[in-house]
Image (cartoon, helix red, strand yellow):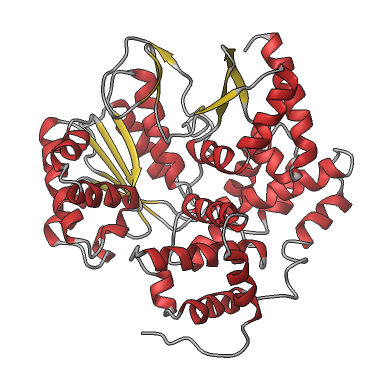
Amino acid sequence: MNKDLNDLWNSILAEIEVDVSRANFITLFKPTVMLSFEKNIATIAAPSSMIVDLLQRRYYQIIKNALDKHAGGDIEVVFIPKTVLPVIKDAFAGPLFNQLDKKTLVLPRVRAEYTFDNMAVSSSNQLAYVSATTVAKKIGQAYNPLFIYGSVGVGKTHLMQSIANEVFKTDSTKKILYITSEEFTNEVVEAIRTNATSGMKRKFRNLDLLIIDDIQFVAGKDKVQEELFHTFNILVDRGAQIVLSSDKPPSEIKKVEKRLLSRFSGGLTVDVAPPDFELRTAILLIKAKKYDFELSIEAAKVIAEKDRDGRSLEGILLRVITEAKNRGGELTDEILEIALNNKHEEYSSTFRPDEIIKNVCLFYKIKSTQLKGEKRDAFLVKARQVAMYLLKKEVGLTFSEIGNILGGRDHTTVMYGVGKIEGLLTKTKLSEDLLGITKINGGSVVEY
């Protein structure tokens, strides 16, 4: 990025910083860069597709107003994910890549910072790490499929996206797709609904590398499992690589066809244990470096004692960084203690998570098992997103903690749900619903 663009974008960010919370600025705005500004079109790159989505839905007008003011005109803003550094090459004419122009390709949904080089390794994840690096070097030849399992926040997504980044870096002509099982399900359902199954099959069956996160959520979905089974066979026969992740090993996944479970178990199955104290400390030091924050080893050790979930630790770290920057920038023992001891202080006297779940279920007349289940009926999705929003705003839980409470959902799904409700509050009467939910007292929710 040249100096003029850098100066312009820094001026705009300085203005935006006044209008948004410090936490949102650090997380959403600070990592962005202005790639180009031509013909009244400003192209802004953000770290991931999720952040792009949040900026577009929640902050587009704020960004546009600042650009209009500084650039002197009616500016159009275009956001792109900064997932993998753009590779200049002949354009690949296919549906699997987002084209920035005729010669620039970006690998969707894969975070650039998720690489093997910046992954902390210890005994809890060493086997999975070695297996993943081997697969990245010899796709389709080593372990096929590679099945990685472990609880939330242990680094499964980092491992899988590192494989994608490594393969793409080695050979950018490879057709790579990273997708969650929920997204795979939606694609299959939409293809059936619109009678477009042939296009959907071409998309998934012509890949060199298919990575599916949270594969356990295909349980009980017969059509999805059938499509996955045939896709699996075709890709393996073609020598393509498949990588899957789950919160449990194949043998413990219920409501999945035996023939599909057999395929899951046909390669190498490795587990990732919760990070030990030393690994958590190393992760925090790596994350702090990513946020350009000087974190001492002693401070990292103190934070590492607070949680075993990698994602929760990052949330705690962000709170520490925000507290330090709000108080002058230097992290002292006093500031560290304040940041760590106030995790849910402003919310703790209002609601507990179980009360939020109960009240949402009572208001929408549903069972808690429906709220936490896999069905995606419109009324259930709305209730689920309302619960996500209230658990975030009223209880102060992290996205990972909310995902665990609501049936083991991915933190990005929770982030999207919270953003969805925030976007609706100013446009609908949803705020009245939220007021009603938080005023419910008593009652009970039936379980089955």
Q: For residue 441, which quarter of the picture?
A: bottom right
Q: Residue at x 71, y 52 (%)?
A: 303
Q: x, y percentage for residue 176?
A: 30, 30
Residue 399 is left or right of residue 97, and the answer is right
Q: Residue at x 71, y 39 (%)?
A: 25
The reply to whether residue 22 is visible in this rendering is: yes
Q: x, y percentage for residue 125?
A: 45, 46
Residue 215 is left or right of residue 382, and the answer is left
Seen from the viewer's position, the closer of residues 416 and 242 is 416
Q: For residue 431, which quarter of the picture?
A: bottom right
Q: Is residue 213 above or below residue 72?
A: below
Q: Residue at x 56, y 11 (%)?
A: 39
Q: x, y percentage for residue 301?
A: 71, 50
Q: Residue at x 88, y 44 (%)?
A: 327
Residue 268 is left or right of residue 279, and the answer is left
Seen from the viewer's position, the closer of residues 40 and 233 is 40
Seen from the viewer's position, the closer of residues 52 and 137 is 52
